[in-house]
Amino acid sequence: MPSSTSSFRRPVPVRPWRRIALTMIVLVVGCLATWEWYWRNQGKQPSMDNTEALWSSVRQKVTREPGASATVIIGASRSVFDVDLDEWEQAVGERPLLLGLSGACARVFLADLAAEPNFHGRVVVGMMPSLFYSNGGPYQNAVDYVDYYHSEWTPAKRFSQKVGAVADANLAFLNKEELSFKALYNQWLAEDPFEVGLPEFAVVTQERRHLMIDRVTEDLAFRAGIRRTFMDMLRGATAPSDAEFMAMATEVAVHIAAIRARGGDVVFVRFPASGNYLVREQSIWPRAAYWDRLLAVTAARGIHFQDHPSLNGFECPEWSHLTVADAASFTRGLAPLVAAAFAAGPPNNPQP
Amino acid sequence: MLFNSYGFLVFFAVILAIHYSPISWTLKKVSLLMGSYLFYALWNPPFVLLLWLSTVIDWWVSQRLDTESRLGRRRLLLGISLGANLGLLGFFKYGGFILENFTAMVNAMGLPYAPAAPDIILPVGISFYTFQTLSYTFDVYRRKSKPAQSFLNFALFVTFFPQLVAGPIVRPDQLIPQFRRPHYATRNMFFWGLFLVTLGLFQKVVLADGFLSAAADAVYGSAVRVNFVDAWVGTLAFAGQIFCDFAGYSTTAIGIGLCLGFSLPTNFLFPYAAIGFSDFWRRWHISLSTWLRDYLYISLGGNRRGQIRTYVNLMITMLLGGLWHGASWNFVIWGGIHGLFLIVERLLRRFFGDGTWLHHGFVRFCLGTLTFLLVTLTWVFFRAQDLPTALALIQEMLLLTRSGEVVLDLTNGPFVLLVMIPLLITQWRLRHITLEDALGNKPWWFIALLWAGMIVSLLLVQGGENAFIYFQF
């Protein structure tokens, strides 16, 4: 390649660059291929990093076609574990968007959709009481994601997310939460892997669906650790006071009204839980006070897993989420019920 | 768009493909220009208009300056350029700061005044590209340079994407002549450029974000007072982080330029091996320090108007240099401390002279260590959220108080020493040579191993797409 002279020219080391580059490529490919092979042998699969960017890539689809109908499912982790998008689409002819987030408060996402002028669709709210009625960490988690979408989701990041998704979807070692250097180092430091937090126990798809890994059902100690972590999360948890509940429920009612005013609707869903976790959940947030009453105050329809034979009887291996197979069965039952609830429209006037 | 993003890899590949395609040089420059606007617009499209405004105004001013001989008119034209560029900078970067301080001053006088808080977005890179275009206008005004003959070349000089957002701040005679004739990379340039891109990203993603930022964030974001050890470790972490982050950006920018056949100036020369603050500013953010020297310090009179005036000019330059970094009194204090150290150094030089003992290896090592420790102390003001936090940390670091707590642990603390010790040793050993010299003598397999190691590290650390620190300036 010819080069021209100029008044300013940097010095450049003269080395056998072709040999250097080829050697570098061989070394890099060899190292990464070995690393990838090692982790695949350990049972790891490619999984999307469950980041603000991934959430935003789905959130932007909410307004992709202004005026068009869409069903958006929000909530915490159960809403992304327990919904099989293929089954849903097969059952009702529409593929919903998953905007739920593990450990996050659904009220924030509901508010975001209510404030979105170009959203005219329907919202399915996965109601997990420990997170739905939170004003602390889970609330802030959700706020951080929504704020990222509105203030940092630049065209550059959209483009980069699209390109990066190709690598994430094909390489198992590109799992930042579990297989980055820092994550591995922290796991090595901790005597008990659960010390550094809840280990990853799902593969995340580009549509943000969480697929529970087989290790949860096959490795009893691993499953026990997850159960223990979930129970620890409920330690010291308290239900909101009556005044706090009414403030939250009223706020939710306002958001529902805004969504309905644009032609949409909202349906609450109580996804399954099992074992000691369900018992504890029901003791802290009794159904009558924190589910039935929420539906009454907000004048919204609700689908509780315990009310329908097609939704009941599933066993959550770690007490809180469904396996991939059970999520498919559960969705076959849920999707038509949700469609029917939307078709029926809002119940009569709200009741305090 | 960030260099450390998947999207940039695709963007750069397309730019390279167009640059080395069989189309005319003019078309290639047009595609580089459009690519640069796209690069900027992908952050926030409307702000490309500010780039345009700065480009058009300075092009028009420089063309008039070339033919205008009347001093009054020339000064007016210069004033237009200064007004436009500094006005843009002032509004977008300092508008909120000015209003905040004006409100505080008025309230302190007993007058009630509570304006609505402005919501002004800071355009990325505005401090850099306004200074770059101002250097062009100044050089034309001083008749040091002729104005660019081609608007395309000038627009490309303002907007050239590798250095648009965070420097190096390039002088017109360094870059515009390179656009006049076709420029392509030789094999050496291209591969060295790719190596530098890798090195820059390694510094940013692996060292700064991967190993150092956690400790710095833990200390500077602590809700409790931090103890002596953690205050030093956290500040050392930030010293390393800001160097690796900023030098990483510059290195990547230089590498990208080389891949396209263009040479950008060096911006960092092993600054933590500096002996004295004058030496530090010849090694740290060289493009800014030389800009301030040539267009501010010398314009104020430099060292030509006596000792006292020299110190005043030095302090003004450093205070404004600090303010350039951000709309906060912390940055002004940071600049002021550097100004103070520069003045003290000059006084000490006058007192001690240039004795042979000062050139003794051990003495120079001690002075270098002292310089690094003092520079590290100044970083406290640069990084701390506010003045009380900065002062609390300084008190702990100087053992003026001992009431702090431990905030660092094995998940973040050890990495600071793991990175900083080799970094400082490397900088000290290479302080008299350039990176090109250092690697130019190494065996080919060493360079290949190093290159491969950096790429593998980049992929194993899996840093997120974190913005470079200097984007906020």
Image: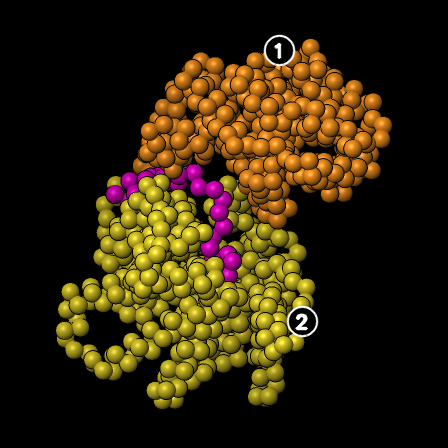
Chain colours: A orange, B yellow
**Residue under mark 1: which chain is it in?**
A
Q: Looking at the rendering, which quadrant does residue A82 occupy?
A: top right
Observer-nearest of B441 and A232: A232
Percent x, y for residue B333? 43, 70
Question: Is residue A89 visible in this depiction of the protein?
Answer: no
Residue A248, placed above or below residue B329: above
Residue A348 horizontal side relative to residue A76, left or right: right
Q: Amino acid at mark 1?
A: Gly
Residue beneath the point at 32% across and 70% down: B277
The residue under label 2 is B113
Labels 1, 2: one chain: no
Residue B127, placed above or below residue A261: below
Q: Looking at the rendering, which quadrant does residue B122 occupy?
A: bottom right
For label 2, the crowd category at 10 Å Cα-Cα, with few meaning under 14, some 14 to 19 and many 20 or more, is: few
Report the Cα–Cα distance between label 1 and label 2. 65 Å
- Mark carried by residue B117: none
Residue B310 horizontal side relative to residue B320, left or right: left
Q: Amino acid at mark 2?
A: Tyr
Q: Is residue B455 magenta?
A: yes
- Mark carried by residue A313: 1
Observer-nearest of B174 and B303: B303
| Count of number-bearing discs | 2
Residue beneath the point at 46% across and 64% down: B387
Q: Secondary structure at mark 2?
A: loop
Residue beneath the point at 58% across and 32% down: A238
Give the residues in magenta.
Answer: B446-473
> Residues at badges 1 and 2 in contact (C-beta under 8 Å)?
no
